Each structure stands twice: as C-alpha cells, then as structure tokens.
Amino acid sequence: MSHPARSFLFTLLCIPSAALADPPAVPVPAPVALELGEGSSPGRLRFALRNVTGAPVEVLADRRLLSFVATPPAVPVGVRRRRTGRLPRCAHDQRPAINEFSSRVMLEPGQRYSEEIDVDDLCGLRVPALGPQPLEFHYGFTPPRRGRASHARSIVTDEREETFADITAVAPPSLVSARDPDPAAEGPSRALLSLTARGSSASSAAGLRVSVTLRNPSVQAVWTLLRPTQFSFVVTDPEGREVACDALLRQPAPLRDLFVRLPARGRRSYTLLPSMHCPPSTFQSAGIYRARASFESRADGEAFGMQRVFTGIAESASVPLRVSRGQIVPQRPRYE
C-alpha cells in the first residue's frame, strides 16, 4: 500500500463514527394545532383542531382521543425537586387504538373544526381533584419511544409521508373544575321528604343503574304511600334534548298496607333501571346523560287516621349517567 493511501485510511479511522452518521432528522411540525375553551354549560369544554398550514389537511375528529395530565409544580432554582407521586390525569376508557374507525374532517388553510366533550365522560365519572397547576392536554395516540408513529396511529390521515401521533396544548385547571352547583346542597328542604339520587356508568343502556333515596329530614316520623312505580325521570341527552322517562309511572291504590313509616331522619332506598323507564332510543349514543329523578304521591292517608303524610312531588338534583359505548355523535360540531 502506498504512503498516500495509508495516510487516507488513517484519516478515516480517526474520524468519530458520529460524524460519519447521517445528521438527525429535524421534526416536522404538525399541520394542525389543538385549542381549548369553555363549553356551552358547566362541566363541558370545547376542543378545536386548526389547520396552521397553507394547504388542506385531513385530520381525525374523535373526542375520545382527548386526554389531560396535570403539570408538575414549579420548583425554585436551587431547591431539590421532590417526588410528587402520580399526577392527576384523565383519558377516555374507549380511546381507539388505531385511526381506522374514527371520523375524519378536511380542513382548509386556516380553518377550525371544534366540538364539545363532557368532562365526566372524559374521566369516566371520576374527575380527579386538581390543584393550581396548568393542565397539559393531548389529542391523539401515545407517541412511540423510538422513530415515528405509523400511519395507523397518526391523527393526520391524508397521503403525506409524515405521521403525527399527537398534538398538545396547555390550559388552566378551571376549564375542568367548573361544575354544576348541586341544588340539594343549598340548604335544608322544607318538604316532608327529600329525594337524592346517584348515577352510574355502563357500556350500554341495559347496565345503567340509578340509586334513589327518600329521606325524612324532620325529627318527627312521616308516612307516605311508597311503591317503585311512583318514581320517574327526566333525562337530558348529550345534545341537550329532554326525554320524559315515565313508562312505569303509576299511582297505586291507596291501600293501608302500601303506606310506609319513615322515622325521624329515616330513609328508604331503591335501585332503578333507567332503560325500563325511558323510551328505547334514549341511550343510543355514547356520552353523558343527565337524569333528574322524581317521586310522586297523591294519597293523604286520612282514611287511616295518619297525621303527617307526604303528598306531592319530590325531585332530586341532576346526576350523570354515562354510556361508554355506542354511536359516536359529534357534540355541537362547528366549522370556523
């Protein structure tokens, strides 16, 4: 081997391998941005996808892809960071694994698509307690640890080569914490009986349950005619439409054996099936339904010498009923 060849080989061997490797690829910014704002009612938020490029882009429109996690508290300079444990977070339990069954929208340059989501639906009726720290919202799939996401796990679904697993945005915790006030908590009721209810979550309407409790807030006993057929519901669906659920509502004959005595501070509870009380098409769509339970009694018990007898209607506060599976209907979608 000639001397110049040996010199060239020695030069190549001395060059670091990192210098010979291809330079790292610069990440391509996502063509859509995530924006967040308040919804049409407390407990709801509106998320938007905005095309930030000069060309049309096709993107997934599936509210189940939205999630959030609290950001860690800020640590002053020079202070050692302590372990804070698991940060509060929420993700939909029916979040799709791939993009092949999610709806898609085409956005022109600068166009926005938005829709609402109920926080109770996002968190599965278990909204975590939040501190003052901002929330980091994600829209999309979990990014891979290495390389880029596959086209089946990209929120952008047109023919471009680049893939984008998710996009993020930061929002204040008040966007999630705002809830409907509970009318039952405003003060003691002056009625002889009060009604409370507790909702539930299920994959379909058949699994929904509502626990209702009649309470006697007085220090004296109260009588009432009491049968399960005296309960009914008014259900508000995810689109805001009210449905009367009174298919089983019946006033029984005022027989003496059907009256019950609720002692001071006493209560009686029942578990009801909303699917039996409501029209068959009430719970077809996935999402959050709000139900107000009612109890009605018309029998005064005078024929049996009863003195303190409840007559009238007792209503509960609104409680959530969550259907986790079903038809995914966009909630108040908007193009801007």
Image: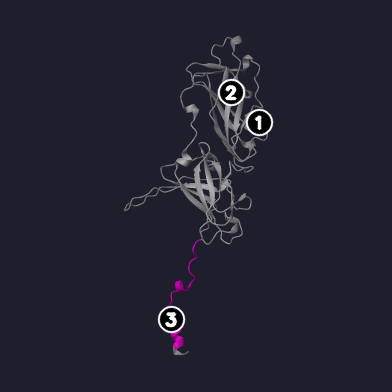
Q: Can residue 128 be seen in this view?
A: no
Q: Where is residue 140 in the image (x, y as percent from the top left)?
A: 55, 51
Q: Which of 323 and 236 is in front in this view?
A: 236
Q: Say few, some or many: other residues with alpha carbon within 10 Å of mark 3 (under 14 / 14 to 19 / 20 or more).
A: few
Which numbered disc, 3 or 1, marks the residue closer to the eye?
3
Residue 179 coordinates in the image, percent (x, y): 49, 36
The residue that label 3 is drawn on is 11
Residue in view at x 54 percent, y 60 percent: 148
* Residue 6 belongs to the span the image colors magenta: yes
Query: Does the rendering let one see residue 320?
Result: yes
Q: Distance between the residues labelled 3 and 2?
A: 91 Å
Instruction: Count residues near mark 1 (Cα–Cα under 10 Å), then give few for <14, some for 14-19, many for 20+.
Output: some
What residue do we see at 51% from left, 16% from top?
221
Q: Mark 3 and mark 1 in contact? Answer it, CB < 8 Å.
A: no
Left or right of 157? Residue 190 is left
Relative to 36, say whether 12 is above or below.
below
Q: Where is residue 78 in the image (x, y as percent from the top left)?
A: 31, 53
Work out how far the residue at label 2 is from the one at label 1, CA to CA, in angstroms: 16 Å
Q: What element carries label 2?
A: strand
Residue labelled with disc 1: 276
Whichever of callouts 3 and 1 sits on the residue coming sooner in the sequence is: 3
- What is the residue that sits farthest to the bottom in this orientation? 2
Q: Main secondary structure of the magenta part?
A: helix
For mark 2, what is the residue?
A: 295
C-alpha gap between disc 3 and disc 1: 83 Å
Chain part drawn in magenta = 4-27
Q: What residue type is labelled 2?
A: Phe
Q: Where is residue 307 in the image (x, y as percent from the top left)?
A: 54, 11
**Residue, far right:** 280
